[in-house]
Image (cartoon, rainbow, N blue to C red):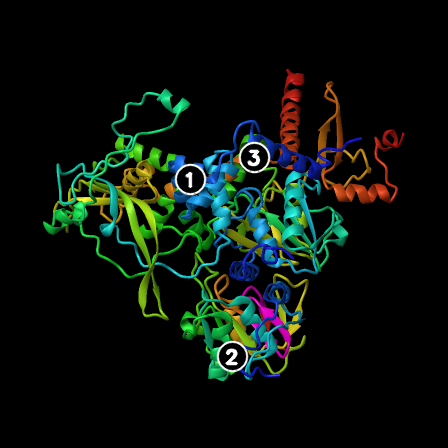
Amino acid sequence: MYVAVKGGEKAIENAHAWLAEERRGDPGVAELSLAQIREQLSLAVNRVMAEGSLYDPDLAALAIKQARGDLIEAIFLIRAYRTTLPRFGNSTPVDTGGMACDRRISATFKDAPGGQVLGPTFDYTHRLLDFKLAADGAVPEAPTAAPRHEPTPHITKFLKDEGLIQDEPASDKPPGDLTREPMEFPADRPLRLQALTRGDEGFVLGMAYSTQRGYARNHAFVGELRIGTVAVEMEIPELGFTIEIGEIALTECETVNQFKGSKTEPPQFTRGYGLVFGQSERKAIAMALVDRALRWEELGEDDLGAPAQDQEFVLSHADNIQATGFLEHIKLPHYVDFQSELELVRKLRREAKERLEPREAAE
Amino acid sequence: MNEYNFAYLDEQTKRMIRRAILKGLAVPGYQVPFASREMPMPYGWGTGGVQVSAATLTPDDVFKVIDQGADDTTNAVSIRKFFEKTAGVATTEETEKATIIQTRHRIPEAPLRADQILVYQVPIPEPLRFLEPRETETRKMHSLQEYGLMHVKLYEDISQHGAISTAYAYPVRVADRYVMDPSPIPKFDNPKLEMDAIQLFGAGREQRIYAVPPHTRVVSLDFEDYPFEASKADHACDLCGAEDSYLDEVITDDAGDRMFVCSDTDYCRSRREAGHQGRLAQEDAA
Amino acid sequence: MTPQTRFLGGFTDAPVQAAHAFRAAMTVMARPGELRQLVGATPPDGLSVAAGTLLLTLCDPDTGVYLARGADNPAIRQWLTFHTGAPLVPAAQADFAVGFWQDLVPLDQYRIGTPVYPDRSATLIVECDVLQKSGATLRGPGIRDTARLSVPDAAALQANSDLYPLGCDFFFTCGDTVAALPRSIRIEPEG
């Protein structure tokens, strides 16, 4: 008897049970706690928060655990949870100029007010497997110094004061919200930046890399990269003032890019901008490069036909939750469509054969 | 009852979807943008249909989900479970008893009634997308009714193959205005798009909703000398003997023997219950 | 039963009442000329039950609502604002407009959508003294052959339909009864 995929329900239940068992792995090995993930896999947690668009390290840790370390799956869990959350209001824009920096570097100046602070970076580590970690993760305490209290102004401020870099005037216009409104093209810069900051790190990295290799090259310098915590403040209309509701860690990157000038503008540097939750510096730098590439039109540059300049291309394909869903959906049964193609191919072959046969008979 | 709002979505999201559905009904075949939400199932797996169903369901509904015409394919089971859990609605596998039917890739064989609603899961709502990948361009083409490109594509098929080589997701023109993708249903189903029931189409990842009201003119694109032809396997169902239903072809042994069975599992079941028998029905009974 | 304050007269079970109300609204929009009962809200004087229920079902902070003269009084404003949070806007910016026909016209003050986004148009909720399946003849999507509906001004509505696919869409409300007329429908006056 033909039963096709009967019993789908039972199969799904069993698959879920098996999955849960696999997730746990060998029960003889101690189970991971969320605190362990949050503290010891913090860069994974940061990526999940950034692309999940939800700042909550504990939930991100839970998602990573549940997803067996599949970060895109973890991001998906966070997104699906996020969308059910009620919105109580909007914070005021965070002031990254007032960031308490753990790391702050500029590639464009040897030194600047606020200093060059390396912070906890992989940059100058030698990528040698540390077998000590396999046995015992104890680390000696890192040396500390008294916190700096001097302000750490944005590097681009110095260029701006001299008129050397394009000004980005502040605006009170509320930015669009791509989680609440369908994406519409052409998308303005706030919307593009939103899409990039939650976009897939690998995709944004690849796009940025393509600009460096000549597909709409824009000669980016890392004017500044800073990582640290900022206060999140909210205006409470009933109180008539703003209150601090918490702190978040951010990575911000401003690139300084060449600009030849246009008919109306003398030569001047321009900017690309990246801002990402947590310590996510690869993503922030890549975002800034892609942001800059997408600005060709407003800066009066030529369309070089490069993928990174094409906002429909970049923004439509940056979201890994959309991408992975659609990619993986081809696992679902398509036998009805395939059947219709089968019929068509058979028919076309039959007709082709019929056309050929009389000719052969006549020969 | 449970920790979710009725039918999972919050009320503001439902209102947004409902407004889009109403505009979709007012302009049949036009794709209304909507702010699709992230659902607890992946994009591409019916999130658009799920959101449309969630915004349309009432607790009195009887809900049916089919994928490839079948109620017990895994994704259909999964979506049906989702609404059993989050909306507490009754579910059925019988087309006749359902008030809302969510479907992927098929239109049920039994004609739908005026009190039923058919919700389609749509992967790529834009019929012009594979001719022109840019949304900015396809929007313009729809606004100007610039559908020449589509006809050129179909005509190239004919000159190359002697026939239109689109077998599913076959484009239609709705109410003499918009060219619409009927979702990847086999073209066999296209004539059924003119029906008594309301048809709603949801594309979650692509953030579009569209609709076809009852008794709306839906014409499959064709040419005078190459008229549209709804085709199916040239067999009868081996289980119920139906000659008018869309068939799945199943390979039954290593020698490549085939059997053909109704893709609409409920249609096949109800015919067999009514005593109809196909070629292989006897063997089964034995 | 008029609510005593703005706080009353809303849905008592919003997810379920709004779902039923939407189904009625969707059914009439999909089947122009059909009548359905539309209940759930108890709006203040000056708004019918059907119109009030429609507003609670479809409006929120994302939709601008225009209250046309007779439907514009402090009680209705407060009630609508409390229950929906919808901003009150002039006719030209409205997503929804509500009132009697003579207060709503002229139609050319409403958004009719744009060629690329025809959905960005106003929906008018027209309060009627009578609403029945007689009068003007309707033809188009949603109607098997023809339907009849007591519309207020067949010529003005046909002029709207001439803009298709642009144009406004209409609900007609009378007591707890609702009907609809999308822009896709051609209208011939009675006679």
Q: In terms of depth relative to the viewer, which is nearer, C167 or A258?
A: A258
Q: Position of residue A209 (x, y in %)?
A: 30, 32
Instruction: Quickly name the residue at label 2.
Output: C6
* Residue C112 visible, this orientation: yes
Q: CA distance from mark 1 to mark 3?
A: 34 Å
Q: Please, which residue is most extreme toward the right here?
A: B286
Residue found 39% across the figure and 42% down from its top: A199
| Real-space Cα separation, disc 3 to disc 2, in angstroms | 52 Å
* Residue located farthest toward the top when viewing the structure as drawn: A363
> Which residue has dot 1 on it?
A38
Q: Taking A354 as reference, is A180 above or below it?
A: below
Highlighted magenta segment, given as a residue range: C171-186
Q: Amino acid at mark 3?
A: Ile
Mark 1 or mark 2: which is in front? 1
- Residue B246: image quadrant is top right
Within 10 Å of disc 3 (Cα), the crowding (few <14, some 14-19, many 20+) is few
x then y, percent, for residue A154: 19, 47
Image depth: mark 3 or mark 2 in front: 2
Which secondary structure type mostly characterizes the magenta part of the structure?
strand
